[in-house]
Image (spheres, rainbow, N blue to C red):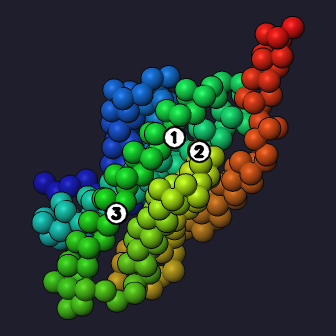
């Protein structure tokens, strides 16, 4: 058998299972049910995406000749897919931070700190898998096509993920961003993964254009629009966030 990452459908299922497993693992390190929410959301979203991809045709398509190799599928493709998965999970944790802070009084200081730590930890795994997967992809390209790097759209997408995650981590290490900044930037990371995973296939060019899908451009634009709306909402001054307003009300009541 081959690793379950041979086409868009199987990679969606693989990412769903991986994200759900990572969510359950987070429960071992963080309270508040953070991991349970991640696992539930991952299962729901991945099943929806996989069902949409399956509706376009047979999920057991003939494997592309260049993909017909056990070693590179098990190393490069699996690493890259783990990079996608962990970047998405980091983005979802950032979304949780913004949602709970903006729209509910539930974002306590302890929960905010745990979400920030979880996001940072997952992002570290993300850049590791993305970088290793990209290097392995270059070695595979050299083996198959005689060149390590050719600025192919898919290669550029993989590089974009690595560079963006590196930028976010360095911004955090340099204290250029705090909790909210990390949450917002990880959502931008989701867009880079969506483009690399699905978008480059729509260009119809390059050596990696294996999966053109009807209507994918519309779906990608919708995903981008939703992310931009969330990011814009996250830029609202934090003094107007419901969690902070509720905290002020509680403190005022305690002093009366």
Task: Pinpoint residue 144: horizontal percent, then vertical percent.
Answer: 19, 84
What residue did someone put label 1 on?
A: 116
Contact flag, marks 3 and 1 (Cβ < 8 Å): no
Decide if residue 63 is on the left or right side of residue 222.
Answer: left
Above-or-below relation of 98 to 217: above
Instruction: Kindly report the distance in space between the C-alpha atoms of the residues bearing marks 3 and 1.
Output: 21 Å
Above-or-below relation of 88 to 97: below
Badge 1 element: helix
Decide if residue 133 is on the left or right side of residue 217.
Answer: left
Query: Who's the residue at 80% across and 24% down the image?
Result: 248
Query: Who's the residue at 55% across and 55% down the image?
Result: 175
Decide if residue 116 is on the left or right side of residue 98.
Answer: left
Badge 3 element: helix
Q: Quadrant of the N terminus?
A: bottom left
Task: Pinpoint residue 14: horizontal percent, then vertical percent.
Answer: 33, 48
Instruction: Kindly report the distance in space between the C-alpha atoms of the residues bearing marks 1 and 2.
Output: 6 Å
Q: Is residue 7 visible in the rendered structure shown here?
A: no
Please tell me which of labels 3 and 1 falls first in the chain. Answer: 1
How many residues crowd around disc 3 within 10 Å: few (fewer than 14), some, or many (20 or more)? many
* Quadrant assignment, res 219: bottom right
What residue did someone put label 3 on?
A: 130
Q: Which mark is nearer the camera, 3 or 2? A: 2
Contact flag, marks 1 and 2 (Cβ < 8 Å): yes
Per the rendering, the mark at residue 179 is 2
Please tell me which of labels 3 and 2 falls first in the chain. Answer: 3
Q: Nearer the viewer, residue 149 or 221?
A: 149
Above-or-below relation of 77 to 121: below
Q: Quadrant of the C terminus?
A: top right
Query: Who's the residue at 31% across and 86% down the image?
Result: 149
């Amino acid at each position: 058998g081959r690793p379950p990452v041979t086409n868009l459908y199987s990679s969606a299922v693989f990412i769903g299972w991986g994200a759900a497993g990572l969510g359950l693992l987070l429960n071992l390190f963080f309270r508040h049910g953070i991991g349970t929410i991640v696992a539930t959301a991952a299962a729901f979203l991945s099943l929806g995406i996989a069902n949409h991809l399956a509706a376009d045709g047979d999920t057991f398509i003939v494997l592309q000749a260049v993909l017909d190799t056990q070693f590179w599928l098990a190393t490069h493709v699996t690493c890259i897919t783990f990079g996608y998965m962990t970047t998405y999970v980091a983005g979802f944790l950032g979304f949780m931070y913004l949602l709970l802070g903006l729209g509910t009084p539930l974002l306590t200081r302890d929960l905010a700190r745990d979400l920030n730590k979880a996001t940072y930890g997952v992002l570290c795994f993300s850049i590791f898998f993305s970088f290793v997967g990209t290097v392995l992809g270059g070695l595979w390209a050299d083996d198959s096509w005689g060149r390590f790097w050719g600025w192919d759209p898919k290669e550029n997408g993989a590089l974009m993920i690595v560079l963006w995650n590196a930028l976010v981590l360095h911004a955090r290490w340099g204290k250029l961003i705090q909790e909210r900044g990390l949450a917002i930037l990880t959502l931008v990371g989701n867009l880079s993964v969506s483009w690399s995973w699905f978008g480059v296939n729509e260009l119809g060019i390059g050596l990696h254009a294996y999966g053109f899908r009807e209507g994918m451009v519309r779906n990608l634009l919708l995903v981008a629009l939703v992310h931009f709306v969330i990011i814009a909402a996250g830029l609202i001054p934090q003094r107007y966030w419901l969690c902070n307003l509720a905290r002020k009300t509680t403190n005022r009541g305690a002093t009366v």
